Amino acid sequence: MINVGIVGVGFMGMIHYLAYQRLRGIRVSAIATRNREKREGDWRSIRGNFGPPGQKMKLDQIARYRSLDEMLKDERLDAIDICSPPNLHATMAVRAMRSGKHVFCEKPIAVTLADAERMLKAAGTHRRMLLVGHVLPFFPEFNYVVQVVRSRRYGKLLGGHFKRVISDPKWLKNYYNPHQVGGPAVDLHVHDAHFIRLLFGMPVSVNSVGRMRGDVAEFFSSQFRFADQSLSVTADSGVIHQQGRAFTHGFEIHLQKATLLFDFSVLGNQPTVSMPLTVLTANGRTFRPKLGSGDPVDGFVAELREVARALKQGKDSKLLSGELARDALLMCHRQTRSVVSRRSVRV
């Protein structure tokens, strides 16, 4: 049995907690939070832009600590699941690895590239595993894309367009602070940056246009250039101030012998699939692959199953590696630089 301690009981901490309940061979044995009510199991104040609302939890069988330092003294724990604010990721991860624990850290890996490199160095120095929670490749629609591209079922990957837009997250403190959360690029678009990096490799440059909010890009459109100049890859991401659409994401991905389409939104608090995952083939066929239950927590269950596999086998994950997460963060920072400078920027 792999014993995990979750530090930070906000929305993502709760989602991870719920996902662990559906797995065998790995369990939450401890939590750490400064909030007394949450330590006592009252999580009703937690909210997010998808998934279940906060609720009361039965934590009788779980050790509860006020801080990470207290939790690191728990010798039962094999790994620490970090769901704290992004600016704390590096310090907590390094401290955990130094104490002999493996680390699964919610995305983004960090706010700054220097912190990301510090985490990777600590993983090597202390011979601990550093996994970063980029869940997108585990959502059924996106996982289908990964499998299709890897199998080359429809030939070479030619390009694609990705979008990820939210309404103003007014319940999140310091969202637009470049030193704490990092704004829409680091917190939101990093999902698609990671997915683009996974599918196409590392771009050589990016050209982004958009609007700034203080020191962070609030909304932006990006065109990525690769060593293979035939690839056409673009993305839109950021915040709009129309609260009736809390969230939307989707893609149109082009392959030699097929096009993959998907579009999902939360409109007026209702999940709305305007374009279910659809495959258009070169021979004129149109079909919709069978996917899972539609429960958004399922993606996190699949992600944590991969965490458990990596920890049990002692082998890094190709989908959750710290290096991949570092590259995604770099892409986000380069896009912000491009918006500010109004020119193409090398990655």
Image: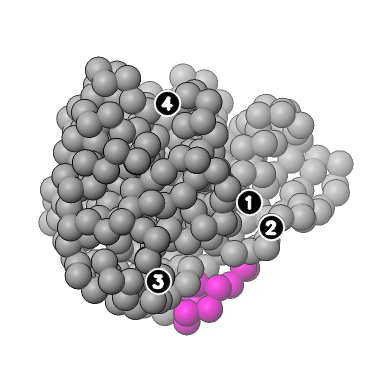
The residue pinned by badge 3 equals: 57
> Neighbour class for label 4 at 10 Å: few (<14), some, many (≥20)?
many
* Residue 219 drawn in magenta: no
> Neighbour class for label 3 at 10 Å: few (<14), some, many (≥20)?
some
Left or right of 92: which side holds 245?
A: right
Where residue 69 sits: x, y (%)? 16, 45
* Dot label at residue 140: 1
* Dot label at residue 202: 4
Q: At label 4, which amino acid type do we have?
A: Met
Where residue 183 sits: x, y (%)? 24, 54
* Dot label at residue 265: none
In depth, the one of 160 and 39 nearer the eye is: 39
Q: Secondary structure at mark 2?
A: loop
Q: At label 2, which amino acid type do we have?
A: Gly
N-terminal of the pair, mark 2 or mark 1, is 1
Vertical order, 9 against 187 (above or below): below
Whether residue 331 is visible: no
In depth, the one of 266 and 180 nearer the eye is: 180
Left or right of 180: which side holds 43?
A: right
N-terminal of the pair, mark 3 or mark 4, is 3
Q: Splitting the image into 4 quarters, where does residue 123 fall?
A: top left
The residue pinned by badge 2 equals: 292
Do residues under tags 1 and 3 come within 8 Å of each other at their CB atoms? no
Quote the CA–CA distance across marks 1 and 4. 24 Å
Q: At label 1, which amino acid type do we have?
A: Pro
Give the mark toward the camera: 4 or 2.
2
